[in-house]
Amino acid sequence: MSNCVVLLSGGIDSSTTLAIAHAEGFDLNALTIDYGQRHKVEIECAVAIARRYGVKRHLVLSLDMAGIGGSALTIQDIDVPKDRFKVSGNLANDIPVTYVPARNTVFLSLALAWAETLEADTIFIGVNAVDYSGYPDCRPEFIRAFEEMANLATKAAVQGGVRFKVRTPLISMSKVEIIRRGLALGLDYSMTWSCYDPTPAGEPCLRCDSCIIRERALRGCD
Amino acid sequence: MSNCVVLLSGGIDSSTTLAIAHAEGFDLNALTIDYGQRHKVEIECAVAIARRYGVKRHLVLSLDMAGIGGSALTIQDIDVPKDRFKVSGNLANDIPVTYVPARNTVFLSLALAWAETLEADTIFIGVNAVDYSGYPDCRPEFIRAFEEMANLATKAAVQGGVRFKVRTPLISMSKVEIIRRGLALGLDYSMTWSCYDPTPAGEPCLRCDSCIIRERALRGCD
């Protein structure tokens, strides 16, 4: 089976992951979740990147995570933190308010549902355990537990003998290594989007964690 | 912590589960997923039942699972099977076309996200392993694997010391036992909805698996 589902947000990590799955020769199905994030422009980037890589299918699925609450990325009255790097000299290790409760669990579940329908056995997700953010659902032990659960959850696994795999090619790379890998695969990072909190004119704020990490990494600094 | 999230579809099983959580003295938060099912009338039933049980919050979350495909419950051009019971004398054990890929995984993930936001540590779901349908995501081994994963996925579990529990009070009951339990708790089953494929006039078809099981169980037959 060479069919896969790639979770594609339109950011650096998921776009690099798509480029890697493409280079490995998979048939690509890209899944983008419109979860009420403030930075909707990333969805337009995902559409353009999916097209560039000639995906077979690109599903943009709407899910109103704002109703669930709990994150600065989806709730307008929680501010996205700014200038954390400048203030502390280094990004803090605590989980920030941009954490979306159980986001990767929800996204992987939707990818699993689609994978089962498409008869794909591989899901790619661009999580990164050495990421600045310390999100618990970016760690290898979470990914393994999800895989275990997926192989008990589905008709394909239980009756069809399919063994679902969650591939995380970036999990132990630094941001600079990720970008080097993407550049080597011909990825044009100007097509990607990182900012959590764009200005009203639709420009990156250049002050949120995600902007700071992006700018540093594109200059070759981890 | 006495706060819980109950997955409430408006059918017999989830409504009984809500009645049980209520009887146990939990603060109730009901989560209903509008996933593009044909039988949207069940959502109106869920609203009425949630009100009857005085839930603190009732979130009806829209999620377009029709985009994911693969089930007669969400895709109009796959027919809901009818009269299976009449033809075979007994419902077949294979997984029917009404199976929605990874549905309980997706629903539990959303419940987990909301539970984390609400600082609830308990999720109730009305799955039933002796159910006619043979869905893989109704079995105890799936529920345990989901719990395991949930406790690696979330900020609350990893940093907050919360241990998420997925409660499945109906998992080993027959349909008749479920209804006896609900009646003992004062549940009015005329408020619930079961039919997968209502008539254009909004009446139950009385021929799909779900209608047949309901009618038999309400008459006291398993």
Image: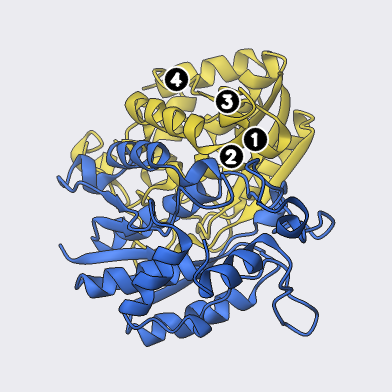
Chain colours: A yellow, B blue
Calculate the distance from the C-alpha at mark 1 to the C-alpha at mark 3. Answer: 17 Å
x%, y% of residue B187?
39, 81
The reply to whether label 1 and label 3 mark residues of one chain is yes
Amino acid type, label 2? Ala
The reply to whether label 3 and label 2 mark residues of one chain is yes
The residue sitting at the right extreme is B77
Amino acid type, label 1? Ala
The reply to whether label 4 and label 2 mark residues of one chain is yes
Calculate the distance from the C-alpha at mark 4 to the C-alpha at mark 3. Answer: 14 Å
- Disc 4 target residue: A176
Between A185 and A188, the one lying in front of the other is: A185
Marks 4 and 2, the one that precedes in the sequence: 2
Marks 3 and 2, the one that precedes in the sequence: 3
- Disc 3 target residue: A17
Per the image, label 3 sits on a secondary structure element best described as helix
x%, y% of residue A172?
39, 18
Q: Nearer the viewer, mark 4 or mark 3?
A: 3
Q: Are marks 1 and 3 in contact (CB under 8 Å)?
A: no
- Disc 1 target residue: A115
